[in-house]
């Protein structure tokens, strides 16, 4: 059954058979693809956060294991070499050494905290500019 141009243009309330109908269909397709992509990106981000937490936990466990191994090696070496090394006069009392170590780590912790604050501020600035 032949139809007129006007009948082909509007069918079920939508423009069909014309350039406008084609553009509308393409736009709807892109909107659908954008929604799918957005959903997949959100899901990937969530999975990435979970993977990041797992990686962080595994990294911390590995570092602690390495620290334990390192301390064991140091103690073993100290036990083995103690009888072989001459007694050196103590330049700094042991209690002061402990204070120096604590002070060094306190300074390092403050520096790391400052670096973290700077990195977070830079990240927020970049996000605002996007």
Image (spheres, grey):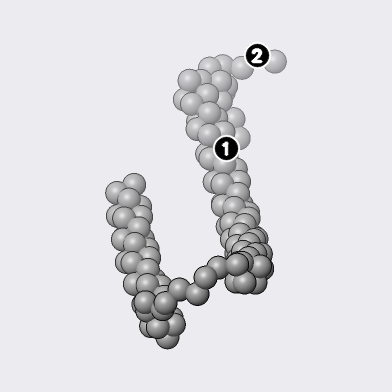
Q: Earlier in the sequence, mark 2 or mark 1?
A: 2
Q: Is residue 116 above or below residue 21?
A: below
Q: Is residue 70 above or below residue 126?
A: below
Residue at 60% across / 49% down in the picture?
44
Query: What's the CA distance linking mark 2 and mark 1?
Result: 35 Å
Residue at 53% across / 34% down in the picture?
30
Observer able to see residue 124? no
> Helix, strand or loop at disc 1?
helix
Question: Where residue 33 is drawn, which disc sits there?
Answer: 1
- Residue 118 falls in image quadrant: bottom left
The x and y percentages for residue 79 are 65, 72
> Helix, strand or loop at disc 2?
loop
- Residue 123 falls in image quadrant: bottom left
How many other residues sit within 10 Å of disc 1, few (<14), some (14-19) or many (≥20)? few
- The answer to which of 102 and 121 lies nearer the viewer is 102
Q: Quadrant of the N terminus?
A: top right
Q: Is residue 129 left or right of residue 63?
A: left
How many other residues sit within 10 Å of disc 2, few (<14), some (14-19) or many (≥20)? few
Count numbered badges in the picture: 2
Observer able to see residue 77? yes
Residue at 65% across / 13% down in the picture?
2
Seen from this angle, which residue lies furthest bottom? Answer: 95
The x and y percentages for residue 6 are 52, 22
- The answer to which of 83 and 94 lies nearer the viewer is 83
Question: Where residue 2 is drawn, which disc sits there?
Answer: 2
Q: Is residue 69 left or right of residue 5?
A: right
Q: Are marks 2 and 1 in contact (CB under 8 Å)?
A: no
């Amino acid at each position: 059954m032949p139809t007129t141009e006007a009948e082909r243009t509007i069918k079920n309330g939508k423009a069909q058979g014309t350039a406008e109908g084609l553009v509308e269909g393409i736009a709807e397709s892109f909107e659908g693809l954008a929604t799918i992509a957005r959903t997949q990106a959100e899901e990937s981000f969530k999975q990435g956060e979970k993977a990041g937490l797992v990686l962080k936990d595994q990294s911390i466990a590995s570092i602690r294991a390495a620290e334990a191994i390192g301390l064991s090696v140091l103690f073993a070496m100290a036990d083995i070499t103690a009888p072989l090394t001459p007694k050196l006069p103590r330049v700094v009392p042991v209690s002061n050494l402990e204070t120096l170590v604590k002070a060094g780590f306190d300074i390092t912790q403050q520096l790391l905290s400052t670096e973290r604050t700077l990195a977070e501020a830079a990240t927020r600035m970049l996000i605002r500019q996007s």
